Each structure stands twice: as C-alpha cells, then as structure tokens.
Image (cartoon, helix red, strand yellow):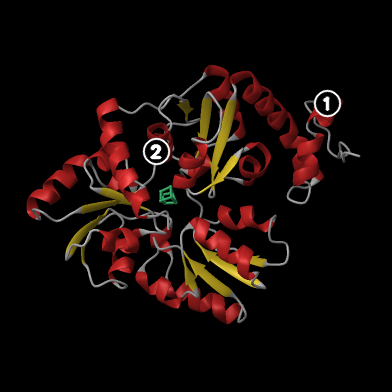
Amino acid sequence: MIAMPQAVQANPDYTSEIAERTAPIYDRVKNVFSDEEWVHLAPYVDEIERLKKERNAIILAHNYQTRDIFHCVSDIVGDSLALAQRATEVDADVIVLAGVHFMAETTKILNPSKTVLIPDPQAGCSLAESITAEDIIKMRALYPGVPVVTYVNTSADVKAVSDVTCTSANAKQVVESLGADRVMLFPDEFLAQNVAAETEVEIITFPGRCEVHEKFSAKQVDDLRRSYPAVTVLAHPECPPEVLQKADFSGSTSGMANFVTENKPEQVALITECSMSDNLVAGNPETKFIRSCSLCPHMQLITMPKIIDSLTNMTVEVTVDEAVAVEAKKALDNMLAVGRG
Ligand code: SF4
C-alpha cells in the first residue's frame, strides 16, 4: 500500500493525478518533508520525472545541493568526482548537473558522448575562479620542474595544464605519489596548508579560497564544544588549519558522510556547507546534527523550476574544447591511478 499525503494546504497544482504518480517518491521522502512542503514540491517533482523519461536523462546532485533536489529528483548524489565517475556507469543520453560549473565540466570530460546540462550557468565557485591556466603557466616558470597538483575544484583549462588532480580526500596521497621534494598544490591555500602539516614534501601554495569554508574559525569550534560538550566535530579540509586542529575528524564531503554512517555519533557538527547536514539527516536518524549554517550561494542558484527549464529547452549545454578535455582527462586519470582516497 503506497502512502499519499492529504492535500493539507490548498495548492491548485497538486492534483490527485500528481499525488498518485508521485506517491512512491513521497513514500521515500516523507520523513524528510512535511505534508505542507510535499504539496508544494510534488508538481515540480512530477514534471521533472516526466522530462527525465522523455529525455532519457539523469540528475546528479552534489552533497551541498538543496534538500528538495537532493532527496526528490536526483539519481546520483555525492561529491563532485564521484558524481562524474558514477555517471559513466549509467545508460543516459542527458545528464543534468545540480551543482556548480566546474563539476559539469568534469562530468563532460568523463562522459564526452553525453549531453551535459547545467540549469544555471552562473553557478560558479570562488575557488575554481581563483586560478587560471595562465597562472599555472606562470608558476611553472617560477618553479621549473616542480610538479603541479590541482584540486578537482578547478576549470577544465586549469586541469589541462596540471600534472595531476586531487580531491580533498586524496591530496596527501597524490602529493606523495609524485616522489618529488617540492610540489605545487593549487589553488586552495588552506587545503595545501593542511596537507603540508601532514607530509615531508615541501608544498608551494596559491592564494585561492572557498568563500564558504574560509569563514569558519577556531573560536566557532570552541563555542560549539562549550554549548554541546558531547558533540563530535567534523571539518572539511578547505577550512583554515586552526579549525582542523580543533576537529575530531577531517575529510571530504564523502569522508564526513561515511564517518557519520559508520560511527553513528550521538551529536555531530559538520564544519562545512550546511545543506550537507540537511541531506544526511534522513539516513542517520539516531544522530543529532548541530547546524553550522553557512550556505554556498552558487549551489543555491540551482532550483527545481530551473531544472524543468533546463530539461525542457535542453539548456545550458556544457561543452569542453576537445584538446583541453584530452589533457584534463590525463590529469584526472593520473589521480585515479593513485587512488580515489
Ligand atoms: S562550497 Fe566553496 S568550493 Fe564548494 S562550490 Fe561553493 S564556493 Fe566552491
């Protein structure tokens, strides 16, 4: 017997046909959304599901994506690299990337025969925009022979002039795999400093920052612990080093998600973009999430109506110059040969 909510709030768009068609999804997400929220969301969900079938499309949603997209219409969720990799295993003609632009580029590089759409091309990233291919070329001239490792949060152009990419999960492993005394690790300054604290390799940094993670402070962690003495603090490596020093665990978004699922802490604070907590609540009902509330403004640009528009008009298609894609893929493959982390 499939559960269906009562139309607890008048919404002329929430018809009995829509209620019936979306009932299986409602059944899956009814612990995440109130009936009032569902009555508002269901017409969008219904239309997106229809368009997905019509276009043979899938939706990839980043861990920082809003709850409605993450839980109701996504087919694959995860960190940026996991999304792009898992999309290669799916038989779809069209991929809608519910995330930011560099993620859509990475998806296109790993899925060249598929049409990749981003519902809002303005969804950028302060970190990816902090460095250009020209910057890398200049830094190579300053440090001849020193290998360049770039974070996956970069444009395809930047990846194409890098030796190897890395994620926040495998940055140390990638740096050490090169067998060099000195390595350039760009562009996230804090990630580079956090890796430098754990390795003998000399790390050359670049002044790139994530506008969300750079704002967290050690004082915030102290305040959290004072208010919630039993809290387990998990921090993303894009945070300043003094924040990581005060955390119980540091890891990528996937690393933090796995930590919560495996360790089932009673109370947890994720020092990262706060949609991540919203999205982990459903799968971890025994854990109380203490919200840090710092939203990525770029992720918030992706909305259900924009996904509908994207699938209806097949916009905005993300393309990567073929020569750039070939070189960028080499840097990604070099990382994958080291390990996903
Ligand atoms: S959270 Fe930071 S790194 Fe992630 S997309 Fe937003 S600005 Fe970029």
Q: Residue at x 49, y 71 (%)?
A: 249
Where residue 133 sits, quadrant-wise, is top left
Above or below residue 121? Residue 273 is below
The answer to whether residue 98 is above or below residue 341 is: above
What is the x, y in percent for residue 192?
29, 62
Residue 52 placement (x, y as % from top left): 63, 25
- Quadrant for the C terminus, please: bottom left
Label 1 sits on residue: 15
The numbered mark, 1 or 2, whose residue comes first in the sequence reads: 1
Q: How far is disc 1 from disc 2 in space, using C-alphas?
A: 39 Å
Q: Residue furthest right?
A: 1
The quarter holding residue 161 reads: top left
Q: Is residue 26 left or right of residue 117?
A: right
Q: Nearer the viewer, residue 162 or 235?
A: 162
Circle 1 — which element? loop
Count neighbours of disc 2 (C-alpha within 10 A) and say few if under 14, some if 14 to 19, many if 20 or more. Answer: many
Q: Split into 4 quadrants, where in the image is the N terminus? A: top right
